[in-house]
Structure formats: C-alpha cells, structure tokens
C-alpha cells in the first residue's frame, strides 16, 4: 500500500512538473515567434496556454488583440484576456484595463472601473498605473478632485522610474499650498512604508 501511495505521489509530482516545463517551453516559443513577427504561430500557442489559465499568455494575447497582431484588432477580446490575466494579479494587465475603461475601448467608459484597476496595479508598484491614478485624482475623473492625492501618486510614479510624472507633479505643485505639499511628502513616505497598499 505504501509503495502504491508513493507511486501515485511520484506520478502526480512528475506529471505536474512536466506540465509546468511544457507551459514554460510553449510560452517561450510563443514569445520568440512574436519577437520574430510570426504572429500566427504566437497567437496559436498563446491561445492554448491562455485557455488553461496561463496569466502571461492571457496578457500577451490581450496585447495582440489590442494591437491587431496575428488577429483582427478587437478591443472586446483584448478586455476579455486582460481581465483574466488581471484577476490573477498581472499588474500590466490591470493597468491596461484601467486604460480600456478610461477611454471606452471595448467597454463602456467607466472611471470607477478604471480607478479599481489602476489602484490594483499601483499597489504592485507599477509606475504607469500610479501616474494614471494621479491623473484621475488631478482631473476628478471617477473620484473627487484631490490635488494632494494626485501629487502623491505622481511622486510615487516618479520614484518608480516614470520621469514624465515629475513634469506633471511640478505643474501641480504650483497650484498647491506649502501645507499641501508637506502633507503629500508625508503621504508618499507612508505609502512607500505600506508597500503601496491602502494608500
């Protein structure tokens, strides 16, 4: 009986490991094909992986539908694949969904939904999402206009490498009081300590 159980455990462990290696190999070959411009092969491989839940494959398949590479451009399909990837925590897919909802690409424009996805991506430190979250607060899209929050998100985006945010942060600072800027600096430090969660 012990040998039987051991054999089963070994079989499942080996099978799972093989599946993971195949997953990894197929994804790599799909990405190589994509980089070479063989979009037909890339789409075929990515679809197989995406349908069984491979988050990166779902993300790149969403990109291909968004850009019309290897498939007809289809924003609704892009949203579908980005959503599946984003729900698994892919921060770039979360950011892309924020864009789709902000501009009504494949979906009805919805700033609250954009806010949700930008926030999830921002909490993972994704600078472009932090920048766009700052823009929502600056413009009052989907949220109450809040210059302090906008400045904080622009500050975080800049610290995470998105230099364009520094320009908007500087323009925004000209509209703020010294007290507001001090508040922003405190909030930025606090947000970094919290690793961007619940800012």
Image (cartoon, helix red, strand yellow):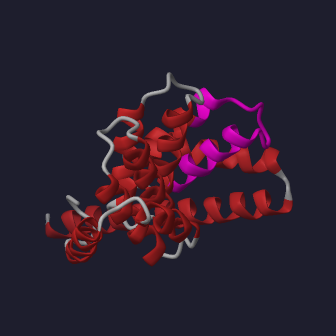
**Residue in the image at 50% along x and 63% along y:** 171
Q: Position of residue 123 (x, y in %)?
A: 32, 61
* Residue 52 appearing in the image: no
Q: Quadrant of the C terminus?
A: bottom left
- Residue at 21% across, 77% down: 193
Picture layout, residue 15 above or below residue 108 = below
Magenta residues (range): 56-78
Q: Residue 93 appears at what percent x and percent y?
A: 50, 50
Question: Where's residue 60, x and y in %?
Answer: 62, 51
Taking the view exactly as shown, the residue that stands out farthest to the right is 37
Residue 67, magenta (yes or no): yes
Q: Nearer the viewer, residue 75 or 103?
A: 103
Q: Can you tell which quarter of the image residue 67 is in? A: top right
Residue 136 left/right relative to 179: right
Depth check, front residue: 124 or 160: 160
Query: Which residue is located at x 46 percent, y 50 percent?
Result: 135
């Amino acid at each position: 009986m012990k040998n039987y159980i051991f054999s089963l455990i070994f079989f499942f462990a080996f099978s799972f490991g093989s599946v993971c290696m195949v997953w990894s190999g197929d994804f790599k070959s799909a990405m190589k094909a994509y980089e070479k411009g063989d979009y037909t092969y890339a789409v075929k491989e990515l679809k197989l992986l995406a349908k069984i839940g491979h988050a990166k494959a779902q993300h790149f398949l969403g990109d291909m539908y968004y850009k019309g590479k290897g498939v007809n451009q289809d924003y609704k399909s892009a949203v579908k694949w980005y959503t599946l990837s984003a729900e698994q925590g892919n921060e770039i897919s979360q950011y892309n969904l924020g864009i789709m909802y902000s501009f009504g690409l494949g979906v009805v424009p919805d700033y609250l939904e954009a806010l949700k996805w930008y926030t999830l991506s921002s909490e993972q430190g994704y600078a472009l999402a932090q920048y766009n979250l700052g823009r929502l607060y600056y413009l009052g899209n989907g949220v109450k206009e809040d210059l302090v929050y906008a400045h904080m998100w622009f500050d975080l985006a800049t610290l995470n490498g998105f230099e364009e945010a520094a320009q908007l942060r500087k323009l925004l600072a000209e509209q703020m009081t010294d007290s507001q800027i001090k508040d922003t600096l405190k909030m930025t430090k606090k947000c970094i300590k919290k690793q961007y969660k619940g800012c």
